[in-house]
Image (cartoon, grey):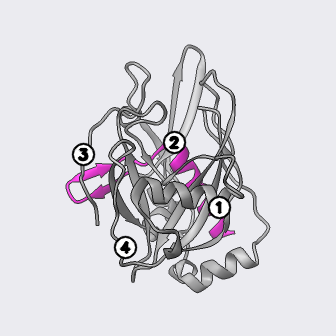
Amino acid sequence: MSTLPPVLTPLSRLPDFDPRRVPVLGTDAALPAVAVERLRPEALQQRFLNPPSWAPEVTHERRFADRQPAHASVLVPIVLRDDPTVLLTLRTTQLSTHSGQVAFPGGRMDDTDPTPADTALREAEEEVGLARHRVQVLGSLPLYTTGTAFMVTPVVGLVQPGFELQLNPHEVAAAFEVPLSFLMNPANHRRHAFEAEGVRREWFSMPWMDGADERFIWGATAGMLRNFYRFLSA
């Protein structure tokens, strides 16, 4: 389910920092996985139509970018396979922010975008060629503010299979799918912490073996997935 699988690219522009080498503090295997029944399309639709009382676990990262905050959106594309998957991308290494990292399709909100969902759908079409008519938007998760000062709205949508992706080579090095059941199982959520110059940063990672390649899902993408877990398990 993947295309063009380059791996082992730098995951941070910070010198001498590789999140893959930061020790794992632990996982959340004691927490229950989201039941398979709750991952079916009808159950996901009902969850957004009748949301439970819940609170996101991760809302912002410690800011490290000296730039003006900007609104952005990402699409959390759930592909309707027999075992639903989440479509993710590997960003190219020449991008100015989050280069070489696993990410949802998405980007900065344009003045011409009426809503955050329009931003997410436009960016997904521009980045990976996912036509918006294949996406049924279910709703949004709470705002997530990255350390690079992006205020991100995660837009969750169901994607009809049968699409052919066209990757934008300037932004996307690869696209691949991860089973939603894997991502919604806290046993696969690893906790990390790193301290430098008196500043402590903490994050989740959810490494996925895509054949012989490890896709290291971490940072903002993992944080938003963790909030999705909290939303579905509430």
Question: Of the residues tagged 4 and 2, which is closer to the observer?
Answer: 4
> Is any part of residue 184 visible from this angle?
no
Say which residue label 4 marks. 163
Q: Residue 219 — which label?
A: 2
The residue range painted magenta reads 207-234
Answer yes or no: do the residues labelled 1 and 4 have beta carbons within 8 Å?
A: no
The alpha-carbon separation of the residues under discs 1 and 2 comes to 22 Å
The quarter in which the C terminus is drawn is bottom right
Q: Residue at x 46, y 68 (%)?
A: 131
Q: What amino acid type is highlighted by mark number 2?
A: Gly
The quarter in which the N terminus is drawn is bottom left
186 in relation to 207, above or below: below
The alpha-carbon separation of the residues under discs 4 and 2 comes to 28 Å
**SS class of the residue under badge 4?**
loop
Say which residue label 1 marks. 117
Say which residue label 3 marks. 6
Q: Is residue 104 left or right of residue 94?
A: right
Confirm whether the magenta stretch covers residue 191.
no
In the image, farthest residue toward the top? 197
Q: Residue at x 47, y 62 (%)?
A: 183
Answer yes or no: do the residues labelled 4 and 2 have beta carbons within 8 Å?
A: no
Of pointers 1 and 2, the one earlier in the residue sequence: 1
Question: Of the residues tagged 1 and 3, which is closer to the observer?
Answer: 1
Q: What amino acid type is highlighted by mark number 1?
A: Ala
The alpha-carbon separation of the residues under discs 4 and 3 comes to 22 Å
Of pointers 4 and 3, the one earlier in the residue sequence: 3
